[in-house]
């Protein structure tokens, strides 16, 4: 089996970071070896906000300056830097932080959900707006998205710090304005160590810049491996494989939206232990009851995050299908007017690109009503992990219909020795055959 996500190379990663350092005003001679996450926070105007505090403090604390100033580990320096009562328009008062169960980072070729010792994936995203007068503002950078990746047993607190530190931290810098002349990248990617070593490695450097993300994007036969910046990043955050040659400009690069509905879907298939976990799918919600004020408040933060992700998606170039943008627009539409209820897969067909496009919401001439629901649920379980950001979205029936024949072939291991789908597991024969049968009926639609 061959990897589907371009792993890139160590040399490409080094060259990328050197070019990024030159574009952003860092010292290119020392950037790869010496740069740490705190340097990037200082670049964006947050020199006294420590990366370890961003990781360990709750979302509620991070989003309330009056509480934050009392909880940070460097209180006096923090207040000296930001002031005791910064104005309402200071971005330090406008942080967004969300924490949630993240099924897509779980390697199901290795993790056995029925095993109580299995560890599941959780994420925390913190968005910081660049502060006025910072070096980042001078480079036309508008915001920083910081992503923490945590792993914990279903019964354990995934964000208990320092017991459950982030395995790695990913950062995307965003430009709000369109690319300039000469062209500027709409995004820059960085990977860092967490603020504590998950393995108590004495050589671990907190927040140190890394060339690659060690992950299991292509799993089953493949164990976790290095996926180097920028190629691996661009593969999942854009809709064209390669950037402009010899530049850092991935001009199609997009933020990926937060699909709460999919996370709740997965509690009924591969991740049943999380359904009975003490921790909510939306961790900050307290529990999975959408009627509670705490759940609604946590959901509001997700909505704010997705609105900013939509805005960024709208600004950058895109392929004709624009499926990433349509996906986040669909999420916002079905959850408009404060609707926090979980929507089933059949209820969230992507907004069509053209009025004549096929959608999952429409009856099928070749699939019965139960079969239409069943097929989409299977695609949601087995294919969404990649095909919500890579090449097409499973909720886009027009695209799935056009690829159905190829999908059937990729399910058949006898036809492709080095390529098989899905890549994170081997389907049992009855499941595989049923999926091929339903895809075959979809393929027969006129």
Image (cartoon, grey):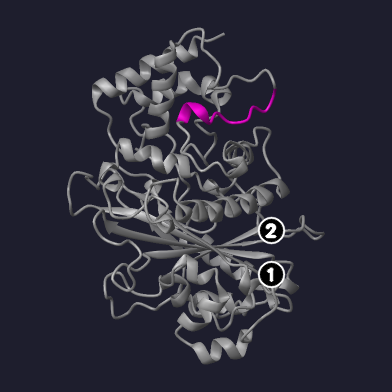
* Contact, mark 1 vs mark 2 (Cβ under 8 Å): yes
Q: Is residue 234 left or right of residue 418?
A: right
The magenta segment is 345-354
Q: Is residue 35 visible?
A: no
Question: Mark 1 and mark 2: span between their CA atoms?
Answer: 10 Å
Residue 414 lies, in percent from the top left, at 30, 23
Of residues 317 and 29, the one drawn nearer to the viewer in this rendering: 317
What residue appears at the point 41 percent right and 43 percent down from the top-left corner?
263
**Placement of 91 over or under 361, stated as above or below:** below
| Residue at x-position 27% and y-position 71% | 199
Within 10 angstroms of label 1, few (less than 14), some, or many (20 or more) residues? some
Above or below — where is 39 with respect to 403?
A: below
Q: Nearer the viewer, residue 285 or 33?
A: 285
Label annotation for residue 65: none
> Mark 1 sits on what residue?
23
Residue 407's x, y, as percent? 43, 24
Determine which of the numbered discs, if any, sits on residue 185 in the image: 2
Q: Is residue 1 rendered to the left or right of residue 365?
A: left
The image position of residue 220, as x and y in percent, is: 29, 41
Secondary structure category for the residue under label 1: helix
């Amino acid at each position: 089996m061959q990897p589907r996500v371009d792993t890139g190379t160590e040399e490409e990663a080094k060259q990328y970071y050197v070019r990024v350092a030159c574009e952003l005003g860092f010292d290119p001679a020392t950037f790869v070896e010496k740069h740490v996450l705190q340097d990037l926070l200082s670049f964006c105007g947050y020199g006294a906000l420590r990366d370890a505090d961003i990781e360990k403090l709750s979302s509620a604390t991070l989003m309330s300056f009056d509480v934050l100033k009392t909880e940070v580990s460097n209180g006096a320096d923090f207040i000296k830097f930001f002031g005791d009562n910064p104005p309402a328009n200071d971005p330090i008062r406008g942080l967004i932080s969300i924490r949630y169960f993240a099924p897509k980072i779980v390697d199901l070729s290795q993790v056995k959900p029925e095993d109580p010792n299995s560890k599941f994936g959780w994420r925390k995203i913190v968005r910081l707006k660049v502060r006025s007068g910072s070096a980042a503002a001078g480079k036309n950078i508008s915001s920083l998205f910081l992503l923490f990746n945590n792993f914990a047993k279903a019964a354990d607190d995934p964000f208990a710090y320092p017991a459950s530190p982030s395995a790695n931290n990913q950062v995307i810098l965003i430009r709000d304005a369109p690319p300039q002349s000469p062209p500027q990248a709409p995004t820059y990617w960085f990977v860092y160590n967490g603020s504590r070593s998950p393995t108590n490695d004495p050589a671990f450097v907190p927040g140190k810049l890394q060339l690659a993300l060690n992950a299991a994007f292509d799993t089953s036969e493949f164990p976790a491996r290095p996926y180097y910046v920028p190629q691996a990043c661009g593969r999942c955050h854009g809709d064209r494989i390669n950037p402009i040659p010899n530049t850092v400009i991935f001009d199609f690069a997009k933020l990926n939206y937060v699909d709460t509905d999919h996370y709740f879907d997965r509690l009924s298939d591969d991740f049943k232990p999380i359904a009975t976990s003490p921790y909510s799918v939306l961790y900050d919600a307290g529990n999975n009851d959408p009627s509670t004020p705490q759940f609604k408040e946590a959901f509001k933060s997700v909505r704010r995050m997705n609105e900013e992700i939509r805005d960024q998606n709208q600004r950058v170039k895109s392929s004709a299908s624009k499926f990433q943008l349509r996906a986040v627009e669909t999420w916002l539409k079905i959850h408009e007017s404060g609707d926090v209820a979980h929507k089933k897969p059949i209820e969230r067909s992507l907004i069509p690109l053209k009025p004549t496009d096929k959608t999952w919401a429409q009856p099928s001439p070749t699939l019965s009503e139960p079969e239409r629901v069943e097929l989409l649920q299977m695609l949601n379980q087995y294919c969404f992990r990649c095909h919500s950001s890579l090449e097409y979205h499973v909720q886009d029936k027009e695209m799935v219909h056009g690829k159905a024949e190829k999908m059937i072939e990729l399910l058949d291991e006898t036809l492709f020795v080095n390529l098989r789908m899905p890549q994170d597991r081997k389907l049992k024969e009855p499941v595989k055959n049923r999926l091929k049968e339903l895809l075959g009926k979809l393929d027969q639609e006129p």
